[in-house]
């Protein structure tokens, strides 16, 4: 069964940094693209970053370009999102899923809460 377990969120001041992680299981992790999504208060879930199977290709939403970096470790079935220069607008629950254009699986993890506030 497909599972995503996100971790690493927390409370951080504007301008600070966090790295969130997602451990995936139940499918061939190294054979699929992976993506990070986020859902802010009273907002729709949005795609923020994606990475190809081998990690050579990445893509970012305009709102986080230049500040966030997605990476993966296929040996650990883990995808990461390094978030720098955080802004209050980055406050959201962050989720991962497989796939490049859309979520490959209907099941989602519990997400990890990131709150940017002074």
Image (tube, rainbow, N blue to C red):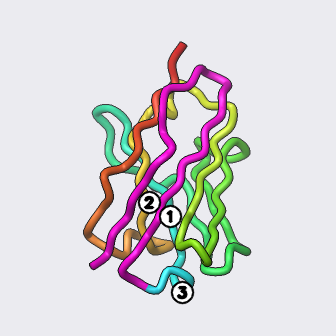
Magenta stretch: give its range: 1-27
Q: Residues within 10 Å of mark 2 (few under 14, many from 20)?
A: many
Which residue bears the numbered disc 1?
Answer: 35
Residue 118 pos. (x, y %) = 54, 13
- Element carrying mark 2: strand
Q: CA distance from mark 2 to mark 1?
A: 6 Å
Q: Residue furthest top?
A: 118
Q: Residues within 10 Å of mark 3 (few under 14, many from 20)?
A: few
Image disc number at residue 96:
2
In the image, residue 38 above or below residue 40: below
Q: Earlier in the sequence, mark 3 or mark 2?
A: 3
Of tags 3 and 1, which is closer to the observer?
A: 3
Which residue bears the numbered disc 3?
Answer: 31
Q: Which residue is located at x 44 percent, y 60 percent?
A: 96
- Element carrying mark 3: helix
Q: Earlier in the sequence, mark 2 or mark 1?
A: 1
Q: CA distance from mark 3 to mark 2?
A: 16 Å
Residue 71 pos. (x, y %) = 66, 62
Question: Is residue 85 found left or right of 36 in the rendered image?
Answer: right
């Amino acid at each position: 069964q497909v599972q995503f377990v996100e971790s690493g969120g927390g409370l951080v001041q504007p301008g600070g940094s966090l790295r969130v992680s997602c451990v995936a299981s139940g499918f061939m992790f190294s054979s699929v693209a992976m993506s990070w999504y986020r859902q802010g208060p009273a907002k729709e879930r949005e795609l923020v970053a994606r990475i190809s199977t081998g990690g050579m290709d990445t893509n970012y939403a305009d709102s986080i370009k230049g500040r966030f970096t997605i990476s993966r470790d296929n040996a650990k079935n883990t995808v990461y999102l390094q978030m720098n220069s955080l802004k209050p607008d980055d406050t959201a629950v962050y989720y991962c899923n497989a796939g490049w254009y859309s979520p490959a699986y209907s099941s989602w993890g519990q997400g990890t809460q990131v709150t940017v506030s002074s």
